[in-house]
């Protein structure tokens, strides 16, 4: 299968059909499928993604807005398909796929930071989600979103990742390509900026 022939990841595989997890060596079936997919063996890529889709989904879901998960799973599959011909089997298949997923997540955050926010209404509705039913929270959310837009880009990204999306400091550091200490510093400064802006707005 070529990247152009694949339009989506296969559906979730029943638990009984998945290779058993191992704390040591990876199940050899995954390596066989990955190498076969890289050579264009029919059905190998579909089988590989069916067996690993849940691992990729869990990895992505812990790091991004829920509204992004399925889209990023598909993007990870497409990127993996393009890279499989170069996969030589030296790294565990799951680790290799999660590395592809990591780069996909990083690129999404970078794209989001570069995209002008000309129409934030849809983002507000998405992010509110369960909050929408709470009395008085809508105005508070709009106020917070407005204040966040006034933060320097690096501080805003660090604050949103760790304090809103609940990404760990270590994961935020990996996503943004800076040391953990830098993330902590940006979050602390961003928090101080928000307190100052709230006082000025009061």
Image (cartoon, helix red, strand yellow):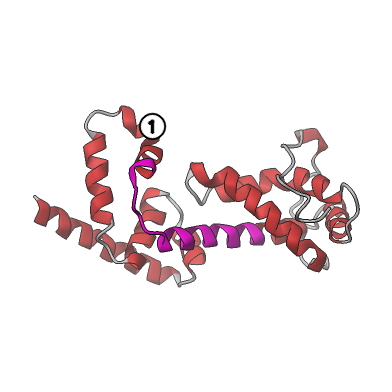
Horizontal side, residue 64 vs residue 200: left or right: right
| Residue 12 x %, y % | 72, 37
In this picture, which residue range is highlighted in magenta?
Answer: 99-122
Name the one closer to the observer, 14 or 149: 149
| Residue 147 x %, y % | 23, 54
| Residue 160 x %, y % | 37, 54
Q: How many numbered circles are shown?
A: 1
Name the one closer to the observer, 173 or 120: 120
Name the one closer to the observer, 163 or 49: 49
Residue located at (21% from left, 62% from top): 193
| Residue 176 sits inside the magenta stretch | no
The residue where tag 1 is placed is 130
| Residue 111 sits inside the magenta stretch | yes
Tell me the crowding category of disc 1: few under 14, some 14 to 19, or many 20 or more residues within 10 angstroms, Cα based.
few
Residue located at (74% from left, 41% from top): 10
Horizontal side, residue 119 vs residue 180: left or right: left
Name the one closer to the observer, 36 or 116: 116
- Main secondary structure of the magenta stretch: helix
């Amino acid at each position: 299968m070529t990247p152009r022939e694949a339009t989506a990841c296969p559906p979730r595989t029943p638990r009984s059909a998945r290779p058993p997890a191992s704390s040591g060596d990876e199940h050899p079936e995954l390596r066989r499928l990955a190498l076969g997919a890289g050579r264009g063996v029919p059905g190998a890529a579909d089988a590989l993604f069916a067996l690993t889709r849940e691992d990729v989904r869990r990895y992505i879901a812990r790091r991004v807005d829920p509204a992004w998960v399925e889209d990023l799973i598909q993007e990870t599959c497409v990127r993996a398909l393009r890279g499989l011909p170069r996969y030589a089997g030296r790294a565990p298949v799951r680790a290799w796929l999660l590395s592809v997923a990591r780069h996909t997540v990083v690129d999404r955050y970078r794209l989001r930071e570069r995209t002008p926010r000309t129409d934030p209404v849809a983002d507000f509705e998405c992010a509110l989600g369960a909050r929408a039913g709470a009395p008085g929270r809508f105005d508070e959310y709009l106020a917070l979103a407005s204040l966040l837009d006034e933060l320097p880009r690096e501080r805003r990204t660090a604050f949103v990742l760790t304090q809103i999306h609940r990404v760990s400091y270590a994961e935020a550091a990996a996503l943004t390509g800076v040391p953990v200490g830098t993330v902590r510093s940006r979050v602390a400064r961003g928090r101080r900026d928000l307190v100052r802006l709230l006082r000025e707005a009061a």
